[in-house]
Amino acid sequence: MEGTILRTENLRVSFGATQVVKGINMEIAEKKVTAFMGPSGCGKTTILRAINRLHELTPEAKVEGNIFLHSENITEMEAMTVRRRVGMVFQRPNPFPTMSIYENVISGFTLNGIKLKTDEKNEIVEDALKKVALWEEVKDTLKRRATSLSGGQQQRLCLARAVAMKPEVILLDEPTSALDPLSTAKIEDLLYELKGNYTLVIVTHNMQQAARISDMTAFFYLGELLEYDDTKKVFTNPKNEKTQNYITGRFG
Amino acid sequence: MSPFEIRGLRGRRIRDRIFTAMVWSLTFSCLAVVFIILFYLFKMGIGSLTWALFTQGPKPVGEAGGGILNAIVGSLIVVALAAIIAIPIGISVGIYLADNRGRKLSDRVALAIDVLQGIPSIVIGIVIYIWIVKPTGKFSAYSGSIALAIMMLPPIIKNTEETLLLIPTTLKEASLALGASYFKTSMKVLLPAGIGGIFSGCIIGIARIAGEVAPLLFTAFGNPALTFNIGKPVDTIPKVIFTYASSPYDDWHRIAWGGSVILVSFIIILNTIIKIFESRWKVQF
Amino acid sequence: MKNRWRILQNKIFIKWLSISAITMMVLLLIFFITLFISSWPAIKANGIGFLWGKTWDPVSNHYGMYPFLIGTLITSFLSLLISAPFSIAAALFLGEYYPKGAIPNIFRNVIELLAAIPSVVYGFWGLYTVAPLVSKLELKMHLPAPGVGIFTASIVLSIMLIPYSVSLIRQVISMTPVSLKEAAYALGSTRAEVITRVIIPSNISGISAGFLLSLGRALGETMAVTILIGNSPEIPHNIFSPSYTMASVIANEFTEAVGDVYLSTLIEVGLLLFVVTTIINLIGRLIIKKVSFN
């Protein structure tokens, strides 16, 4: 594929004796939105978390195969370095509760021990908050606790926190499933705008969401990649019967 | 007929009432005892809370007056030193236990801490005597602090572990996903989020050792003179209460009551701080 | 360069955490080994007869622990016995009769004030309030009336045990499945019947464990008991006699002990105290863990 930024090579993940992801080979396009879809337990979140090496927190998890970011093998790099280049937004908004809004946005830098001058910090914070359309709402209350924001605002804050690090890829794990429809719509608009400058990989259960904002859609089932194509093609003319069944709601 | 012979519903109701009355009266007796003891304590000791008590050292036997300044300072030194030793280690073990659940080593360490918590304090004093006092040939404040530090560890460890376990994993993941190391995540995200519970654990530890005498009997021993040297033996408030209470002198008894009031008030204040902390300082997740 | 330092810092931190954890186990192990080694001279000299030897004579280096064993056991069990009805009642009051609301909160905090009083202050208070009363009682009973003795020590010790046993028993009782209680009430039982026929029997192991743990506490109590026990190395005749406990004899004689065997014997007493309280503690906690997982 042209303009590939991420490539997996026979990616397998098992938890103890259970093989959850069975040999995935796929390429993710740069500066596009790729949606991972499939019924619960199909492995889509597992693959996502394998990219930024979060499975290392689980002792029973075993990740095999290779993942390449541009041409570098990130399965063998130092995990912390990988995670600085690949950002993540989680299902439930998780701003750091002891930090202010300002401190949350810049937390990627402070937690990594990167020292910045105050001007640089201010610029990064303002830039990131503007990118997630939060700046106008919080610019006068940057010192307030992050937990004083609403759910939708908190999730945008988490997005800002990821964006501030200028990652090469942003992974999103069902980022709107815990939010109300209005906040969901706001975030979807944001993601749509961000894709010009960032590569986004989003796991979602919401088919309309995938259809609305993604360029490519990958359909997973029981740990295998069944279909992967342009979103329009996958939704209007799926090649695989299971994809068809999932889209038409025959199973969830 | 006794209530136990009356059959039928009436008998059962009567027995129920008697039972309830017993539960009430026994419970209220407990409360009454609390008030009796505290009231007596303050009645006997409040008169001794003179300026002299706080600012003077003990007078020689036979001379009236005198205070427990040496013991107050001694208590502060011994407790502070014990806290300095126990808190970093306790928090570290707490972090370890919270992050390594299910591992064999964790289980064994948790067991060791359970056992440690149940050791009679006098036995801890014996061991520290053997380890430190005997080889160095003298009693010292720091040996007492080490004994007390061992006693402080279980509550600090337990509270740290429990507090950290309450923090949702997603917070740790958010920090790691930004590329932060486990070290930075623990120091800048997890510990700050759990600071309330961890602090409570430290205060509980301090409250626990503030009134202890047994482990100090052969470590810090006692010292009528005021000293700031941790290498020297030192008196503590509970220790002088013990010494003076066991003595036949009225004057010393008076001072012991004063010391008791100070000690009990201090511990009650600490317990109140813990309660306030636990209800106010709740970090929202 | 900076990256390498970060990685190193992280590694050091992780190592430090496991080292401090292992240190806890090592600490415990060395505790036991130290006590054992230091009491070995006494174990050799006194032999197994130490446990039932009736005389304690430092002058001739003849040691027998029997009086202290008796004193410790009687005091501990008696204090447990005295505190049991109060602890159970208070636990029921806070757990069953008034589980929610402001009243039980106040009650609980008040009872916990008992825990705020240090052992030595209890001893002091007991000396001035309980001992004279017991002395009067002894006079009435035509017994020698020193005031101090097993009975006085047990009374004060029982007060000290109350906050601990109340909280343990309350925890145990709170784990009774609601459906069990509701079934009993639905059959028309009175509250007393539900408590005595359902709640207490179904939690009997947990409650016993609570008492076991309180016993462990009582065995290790030193200061209050030392002040109130009378410090007599003779075998007590009855509960009003002055006596000695294992912890008290150590507290009183350790610093005065001259001679290796004397000191070593006291350490041997400490070793026994350590072993017994540890066993009781472990059994008690094991039972509570089992009960909690059901």
Image: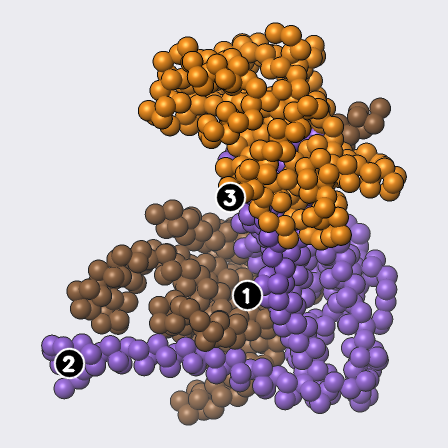
Chain colours: A orange, B purple, C brown
Give the vertical position of A167 relative to B56 (above or below).
Answer: above
Residue B10 is tagged as 2
Mark 2 burial class by Cα count in 10 Å: few <14, some 14-19, many 20+: few
| Residue under the point 30% across and 63% down | C200
User: Looking at the image, is mark 2 or mark 3 nearer the viewer?
Assistant: 3
From mark 3 to mark 1, how far is it between C-alphas? Answer: 59 Å
Q: Is residue B56 visible?
A: yes
On whether disc 3 and disc 1 are found on a single subunit, the reply is no
Label 2: which secondary element: helix
The chain letter under disc 1 is C
Q: Quadrant of the N terminus of chain B?
A: bottom left
Which is nearer the eye, B69 or A96? Answer: A96
Residue A31 located left or right of residue C270 = right
Contact, mark 3 vs mark 1 (Cβ under 8 Å): no
Q: Which residue is mark 1?
A: C221
Q: Position of residue B128 (x, y in %)?
A: 69, 53
Q: Which residue is mark 3?
A: A180
Q: Quadrant of residue B221?
A: bottom right
